[in-house]
Image: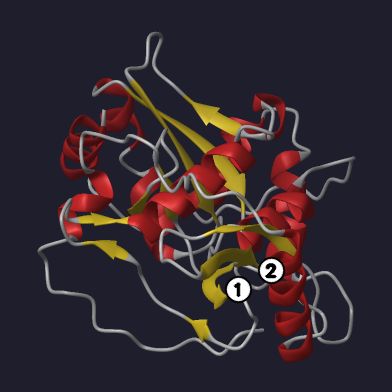
Amino acid sequence: MFKKLSIALLAGAFALAACAADHPDAGTVAATPDPAAEKAVRAALKNLAPNVQFDSITPSPLPGFYQVIASGQLVYVSADGKYMLNGDVVDLGAKRNLSERAWAAFRKAELAKVPASQRIVFAPPHPKYTVSVFSDVNCGYCRMFHSHMAELNAKGIAVEYLAWPREGVTTTAGNPTDTYKEMVSVWCASDRKAAFTAAKQGKAPASASCPNPVKDEFDLGVKLGVTGTPMIVGPDGMELGGYVPPDKLLKLLQKGS
């Protein structure tokens, strides 16, 4: 889709903005959408990438630009469709990354559509925090994160897993990937949690098939910008990182609450 550009963000000064305690109007803009401008933005991006799938086109905090979330990326396009910016918009006065907040609002809304019945949930009796984690059963960091589940739950953190096979759903020949088949078997197991934990320990699940959300959750991850696993998303939609040790994850959640 859009060619990703490498951008040096303004050092660590704005790193705290991503998980700041105050979250007013995350990514929202008061400007009124202009149908003619939206049409110009849409046409410009379709000309650049004919197969692009639009998820959100809204007026941007950057005057004269629209904020576009499409095919797992966020870009800014001028209202006349002539210019595109690929990078973060930062409110220098508030020291706030507005692009991250826009992503967070979008992620939160999209994740809210996934019912608990389609997730694999490890939760303490009365969780203080809940994170959504896109995970693959075979990746090393995913396994390391899952190995801390008892400690995470003891700290009051509930973990809700969504399937994201890193190999994708199908091979170039159109056949299901091995990881996809394994994750379908986990999601179709009579005891999902036990099958998931066993898979994380290198024990392949018994082959099984059933109506399952694995492909839909993989597609959702792509839509939300997932490029690797694990990807941890906080209750506010903020990305909290990949592998994050329990103590650090708790601090991030406390900071953002």
Q: Residue at x 73, y 76 (%)?
A: 40
Tell me, for residue 211, which label it has, or none.
none
Which type of secondary structure does the marked residue at label 1 adopt? loop
Residue drawn at x 83%, y 69% as measured from the top left: 176
The reply to whether callout 2 and callout 1 are in contact (CB within 8 Å) is: yes
| Residue 233 in which image quadrant | top left
Q: Position of residue 132 (x, y in %)?
A: 49, 39
Along the horizontal axis of the image, is 193 left or right of 103? right
Q: Earlier in the sequence, mark 2 or mark 1?
A: 2
Identity, as a three-letter code, of the amino acid under mark 2 = Ala
Left or right: residue 173 versus residue 238 is right
Tag 1: amino acid: Ala
Q: Secondary structure at mark 2?
A: helix
Relative side of 191 to 105, left or right: right
What residue is shown at x 60% (from left), y 33% (from top)? 120
Quick check: 156 above or below 85?
Answer: above
Image coordinates for residue 122, horizontal then vertical, percent:
48, 27
Closer-to-camera residue (141/244): 244
Is the residue 252 above or below the residue 142 in the image?
Answer: above
Give the x, y percent position of residue 228.
Answer: 49, 68
Q: Which mark is residue 79?
A: 1
Q: Which mark is residue 37?
A: 2
